[in-house]
Image: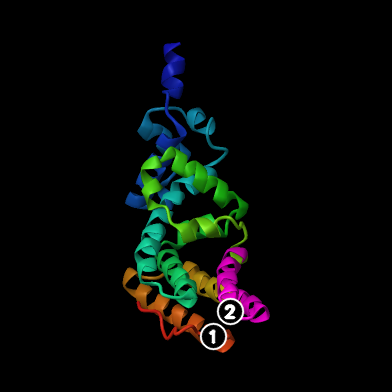
Amino acid sequence: MEERKKYFKGLTRRDYIAKANEIIHREGIEAVTIRRIAKEMGCSTASLYRYFDSRDELLYYAELGEMNDYIRRLNAAEKHWRNVWDIYVGVWYCYSMEAFRKPEAYNLLFFANNNTKLRVSIREYYQMFPENLELSNRVFHEMLQTADFMGRDFEMCRKCIRSNAIGYENAVSLNRMVCLLFKGYFKTVCDDGIKEEEVNARVRQFIRDIEDLVRMLAKDLKGYKAYQI
């Protein structure tokens, strides 16, 4: 009985996720291995596999914590939004700022896995880490109701349609072009890397490109001139 207790040690799913996140913050994602976490937590690898199918699944949940900075950024930014274009461009600004700063995490969360998983995983994450519930954001949770990456952007486009700021056909074009534009920028960041001091300039460039598309396709700019960065 004592051997079995030591073998599994009573650790929870949350404990392993917190340890993996700690290692990622300290040394990067490549430093996380099942064997290392088992050693540092004084348990067997079998104990981890009771809760996670693979290292990739553990990493996925560990990286969910990186969404907190995105939510904080949204909460701060939306205080200054005045119209639907502020919202549309502002959400992309907040998202790209965090995605370009943490490309490994955002690639894992939004592109390497089936997007359907994100909504369910976020709910489970907050159940395990209820202290982060204060970071809730209405826009963020509305977007999570749609599993597909382009679908989430189109939910924001729908707000613009309902406000008579853009026609449906042009909204479809905006959705397609902005999502593909982001993927191009993001792939460059993933492939070539980016220094922390370069992130702001890259994001500003991306936002200017979005604004060019908005000005070209919008029916009514609603007084929007430029995103106040």
Tag 2–tag 1 contact (CB < 8 Å): yes
Q: Which residues are magenta?
A: 151-176
Q: In the structure shown, which secondary structural element does the residue marked by tag 1 occupy? A: loop
Residue displayed at 37% across by 63% down: 73
Position of the C terminus, as image quadrant, is bottom left
Q: In the structure shown, which secondary structural element does the residue marked by tag 2 occupy? A: loop
In this rendering, position of residue 144 left or right of residue 196:
right
Residue 173 pos. (x, y %): 64, 79
Q: Which mark is residue 105?
A: none
Residue 164 pos. (x, y %): 58, 79
- Nearer the N terminus, badge 2 or badge 1? 2
Where residue 218 sits, quadrant-wise, is bottom right
Q: Amino acid at mark 2?
A: Asn
Residue displayed at 56% across by 50% down: 119
In the rendered image, residue 52 lying in the magenta stretch gets the answer no
Q: Which mark is residue 164?
A: 2
Q: Amino acid at mark 1?
A: Asp
Where residue 32 sits, quadrant-wise, is top left
Observer able to see residue 192: no
Residue displayed at 57% across by 60% down: 111
Residue at mark 2 to residue at mark 1: CA–CA distance: 7 Å
Residue displayed at 39% across by 54% down: 68
Q: Is residue 66 above or below residue 180?
A: above
Q: Is residue 133 above or below residue 185?
A: above
Q: Is residue 105 above or below residue 21?
A: below
Q: Which mark is residue 220?
A: 1
Observer able to see residue 8: yes
The local crowd at label 2, few if under 14, some if 14 to 19, many if 20 or more residues have their Cα within 10 Å, is some
